[in-house]
Each structure stands twice: as structure tokens, then as C-alpha cells.
Amino acid sequence: MVARSANGRRGAQRLGGLLVATLAVCLTLVAPGSAAASADLSVTYPATPVQVHPGALASFQLRIGNVGHTPLTVLVTPRKVLLSEDGATRFAAVPDPLFAGVTRIVPARLTLKGRQEKVVTVSVRMPAQIRADDYFLGFLVSPVITSPAVRAVNDVGALVVLDVPGPRAPRLAAWFVHLPLIVWASSVKADVRAKSTGISTLQFTTDTLVSGVVAPRPRVIMEPPHLLPPGLYWDVPIGWSSWLGLGWYRVHSTLVYNITPQRTGEVALSRLVIVIDPLWLIALVAVIAVIVLLAGRRRRRRRLRAAHA
């Protein structure tokens, strides 16, 4: 195991309150025979998870803005969030069945003047028997097509996390990817793969320390917190370089994740890596060739002197 610094422990205890990602679905504005329409959208939503208890009402706001100059009418509709590896998200064409019928959007349709913002209030009644975990809600803001000249518009997605507190069962596994014993290059590019193997969404951070000779650049690689749902993985990039293109290094990666608000878990990885730039092999072969050539010439000279003696 690799010991964590005091700063690392304090950072791990502040893992709560991180939104996983922003989803924006951009289609092209096309108007036959004319310039592209100028109206466009911006959507602001809660930047931290909204805490709510089973059976209670979760309420939050979406701030929708028309950043263009043309008046715009939009619809706000719930969408199921499809989560994938490395934090990738996309929306399904239907609402999440877990929250279907218990989500209220006021107003669901609104008209915005140019450069105007309005607030939409969203209320979600949580099921009484819902398990403690993080739940991802998607909302699609879609302009209403009011002109036959416009065939496509911009849709903007908002991703909101609902945090149901209580006992959870997070578990994290991790391993190095693309990190062999010998790297034939002057620099190393690899990944630490973190996989959520429990039944609850977890949050984790990654700190990597590289030590060895010649001194690596950089020595410390820190990754900000990520939310990782069950069954998915996240590849955290790590890498360093040797100014000589030659050296041996010990890589220590420590992943810290939340088990409870007061307790964290830890996974520690360590590996030895030897870095050899192929130019060193070419130089070595050249040196050997020169030595062989000089030795051959020296032997020929000795034979010639012996023949004339």
C-alpha cells in the first residue's frame, strides 16, 4: 500500500458535491437558400448533486437563456440518461421510467426574447422505496420550429444528479493499462483504469507519483474527482518524460473513493518501468560498429608490418 499525504486525505473527504458532466447535443441550423438562423440556447443547472430523501420532493431550477437576437420558443422534456465508459453520457429518446409520472416541469414551454433568460422549476417526487445512491436525470431543451424555412435546430441537454443519502455498497478496482516493463520511447503515455465493481455510484480521485533516474517530468500527476456508476470504468491518463530518453522509474498510483461521508477506501498500484529511447540503441550499434572497424584496421596494420619485417 502507498501512504497518502495529509492533503490527499483532506481532498478525499471533500469528494461530495461533484456533477459528472455537461451534455450538449448540437445539430446544425439549416435554412434553405438563406443564412443560418441566429437564435441559440444556453442552459444552466445545479452544479452539485441535489440531496433528497426517499418519498420526498426534490426541487431545483434550470435557467434557460436565448443568446441570440431572434425570439425563440422552447420545450423542456425529461430524458433518460445513458451512461457509458470514461464519463460519456447521452440521452435516450424517452424519459427515465423510474421517474416517469413523478416529474413536474413549470413551465414546460416558454418563449424567450433575444438575449433573455427565464427560470424553469423542476420537481421530482422520489419513490418511497428508492435505494441510497446517485441518480442521473436528463432534460432536453428544444426550440420549437415556427418557420418552414428552418429544418433543424440546436438541442441543449442538462444533466442533474440526485443524491439519496444512506448506506451504500461502493467498491473500486484498478489496474494499469498500456504500461509495460520496457517502454521504447523517451516518454510514457499510459492509463490507470478504475472500475466500479460495487452496486453504488462512487466518487474517486487519483494521485500518481513517479520517482526514479533520470528525474521524470512531471513527478506528480493529480486527477480531479469523478463520479463512476456501477459496472463502468474510467481511464485516468498518466505520463511522464525523461530528458535523456533513458531511465528507470517506479510508478505509484493511489485511488481514493468514498465509502461513507466520513470514511474512504483506497486502492494502491505500483510498477517498475524502464524507458529507452530507440536512438540509444542506434547510438550503441554505431559505437560497436566503429569499434569493430577500428579493431579490424588495427589487425590489418599488424599483419602488414609483420609481412614487411
Image (cartoon, rainbow, N blue to C red):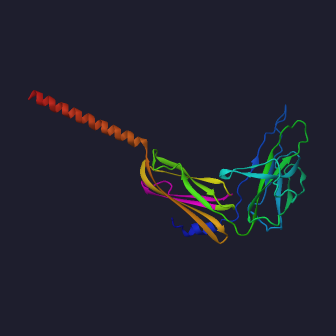
Q: Residue furthest bottom?
A: 262
In reply to whether residue 218 is colored magenta, the answer given is yes
Q: Answer left or right for 63 relative to 288.
A: right
Q: Up-down: is 23 above or below 131? A: above
Q: Nearer the viewer, residue 84 or 280?
A: 84
The boundaries of the magenta stretch are 204-229
Could you tell me residue 119's position as x and y percent?
86, 58
- Classify residue 123 by image quadrant: bottom right
**Residue 132: where, in percent of width, then height?**
74, 66
Q: Position of residue 103 (x, y in %)?
A: 86, 59
Residue drawn at x 64%, y 66% as measured from the top left = 258
Q: Residue at x 58, y 65 (%)?
A: 266
| Quadrant holding the C terminus | top left
Tell me if 193 is positioned left or right of 114 in this view. Answer: left
Residue shown at 62%/59% (left/top)?
A: 224
Residue 233 as seen in the image, left or right of residue 208:
right
Along the line of sight, which residue is nearer the eye, 249 or 169?
169
- 62 relative position to 302: left or right: right
Please name the residue shown 36% across and 40% down the image.
Answer: 283
